[in-house]
Image (tube, helix red, strand yellow):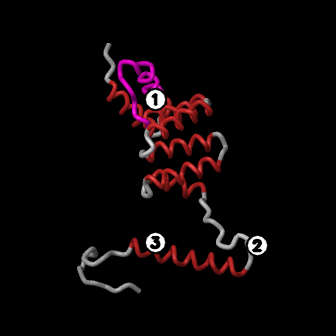
Amino acid sequence: MQLDCDKTLDLGIRACSDGNWEEGLRHLRLLKHEEGACGRQPGVFYSHLGLAMARCEGRMHEGHEWCTHAVTIQPAEPTNYLNLAQTYLLLKNRRGALHALVEGLAVDAAHPGLLKLRRALGFRYRLPIWCLARVHELKLSIRRHRARSEARRHAARRRPRLGEDSTGIFRPAD
């Protein structure tokens, strides 16, 4: 029986993306065993294989190695960084996960999976004046100012632009 490499790769990645890690691992393992017949695989294959191995079988270190290999051979794919960050979290290495997230967001700043994981981890900004205590009044005012400007920026992104609302009438910002 001849294996359809592209179809098997697509089924494995889709199953992993949907959260069905056992089925995805089964497809990706089948593809890994037939690697000679299928040729060289993309980095996404190795990153999904590594994360599936870490999640399903508890082989965290081997899964981490596969995800690192995926980033090495295909550094322009943000999904590889997402899977690497998730293997770091399985290894209970938050710092490594944040580092992988920063690298992934440098590749694609709008990747929804990376942004979702960044929000879940509670990414902290760099301290504005590191030599002062966290509760110093100057630091508190800088944080309040940063929060207000972030809120304004977020509201400006959601505000309809000229011609986007139903009436077509321009309304100046508040």
| Residue that label 3 marks | 154
Label 1 SS: helix
Residue 133 badge? 2
Q: Do residues under tags 1 and 2 come within 8 Å of each other at their CB atoms? A: no
| Up/down of 129 relative to 112, above or below | below
Find residue 174 and report its image quarter: bottom left
- Which mark lies nearer to you, 1 or 2? 2
Where does residue 27 sit, x and y in percent of width and height? 42, 26
Instruction: Report the amino acid beneath label 2.
Output: Ala
Categorize mark 2 by other alpha carbons within 10 Å: few (<14), some (14-19), many (20+). Answer: few
Q: Is residue 139 magenta?
A: no
Q: Do residues under tags 1 and 3 come within 8 Å of each other at their CB atoms? A: no
Closest to the observer: 35 or 118?
35
Q: Do residues under tags 3 and 2 come within 8 Å of each other at their CB atoms? A: no
Instruction: Report the amino acid beneath label 1.
Output: Glu
Find residue 123 and report its image quarter: bottom right
Where does residue 52 sit, x and y in percent of width and height? 52, 33
- Which mark lies nearer to you, 1 or 3? 3
The span picked out in magenta is 24-43
| Residue that label 1 marks | 23
Label 2 SS: loop
Categorize mark 3 by other alpha carbons within 10 Å: few (<14), some (14-19), many (20+). Answer: few
Is 19 placed left or right of 120 in the picture?
Answer: left
Q: Residue at x 47, y 51 (%)?
A: 113
